[in-house]
Amino acid sequence: MLRLPTGLVSPSMALAGSLLSPAPPGGLWGTLVPVGAMTALSFSAYMFNDLFDLEVDRISNPARPLPSGRLSSREVVCVASMLLVAGFMIVLVWGSLASLSMALALCAFVFVYSAPPIRLRRFFLAPYFTIATSASLSFLVAHLFWGGDPSGASITGAILVFGYGSGSCMVKEFKDIEGDSRMGVRSLPVALGLQKAVRVTIPAYLGSCLLLLPFYWLFDLSPLFLPIFGAVFLAKCKTSYDLARNPFDIGRRIRILTVEVVSTVLLFLGIAAGALV
């Protein structure tokens, strides 16, 4: 249900945001409290998303705990609700008003993405911008957790994370195309067809990765960030080339998604490492 390593994406963004905070409290506690809040909130979001996407997963991901019957919907609701409350309690007790506002907005975007009756993931480009907004908010919840006025670098960083999220999440739809098609979800591959969607997606996907490079100058990161970024970008280029050669190969569609998730975690860990060193 936690979809590791996918479940580490928001915590890695939060770690980067926390270490780049305009009002850092210092020490391990100050760094990890906002990361803990975002971890609870993101795990809760993945579990609720699985609940709302149950019918799609019965087709595309039948081995997951819910469609396979290993967990009941009631159990998922209970655990997800506890994680949601825990995450909000951490922000409410220790976080700033700005951070709490961002967390509430993040929760709202998570629900309108997959919960009926709105369910934005049904509508062509809407899910990409919803996920990108959620990524930007994940960064800001931790970045503004301890207060302080957001700087120009903070706002620019959030915009860059939004741009990165818009492109990076596009490859997710290739794995779920069969289930989306049968359930009436108008994802990009369903609307354009697999081959055309790949031609549209790959340039946006690789271009969005380049949007994180300015973090090096924006937040005066150490040079350690650059080789991490270079290695990740090359890995993305390799899996993109493989998918473009044969988009009908389900193995390649799953591989590019796996590489994307791991790459995103590594990129934000790289930003965090660049802020530390």
Image (cartoon, rainbow, N blue to C red):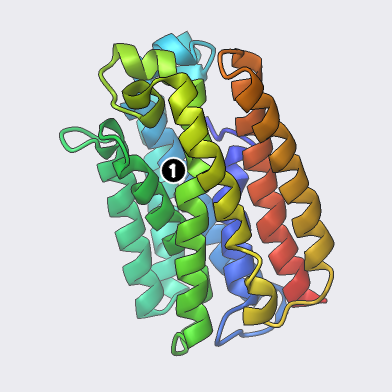
Which residue type carries mark 1?
A: Ser
Position of residue 239 relative to residue 14, above or below, is above
In front here: 71 or 234?
234
Total numbered labels: 1
Q: Which residue is depicted at the point 36% across and 77% down? A: 98
Please give left or right for residue 217 compared with residue 104 in the image: right
Residue 81 place in picture, x, y as percent: 36, 42
The residue where tag 1 is placed is: 44
Helix, strand or loop for disc 1: helix
Q: Residues within 10 Å of mark 1 (few under 14, many from 20)?
A: many
Point out the image quarter for the C terminus. Answer: bottom right
**Residue 202 horizontal side relative to residue 183, left or right:** right
- Tell me where residue 189 appears, x and y as whole percent: 41, 25
99 or 71: which is nearer to us? 99
Residue 19 falls in image quadrant: bottom right
| Residue found at x 43% / y 34% | 47
Q: Is residue 69 visible?
A: no
Q: Which percent across, then down, holds residue 258?
A: 65, 32
Position above or below: 269 against 51: below
Find residue 262 and report its image quarter: top right
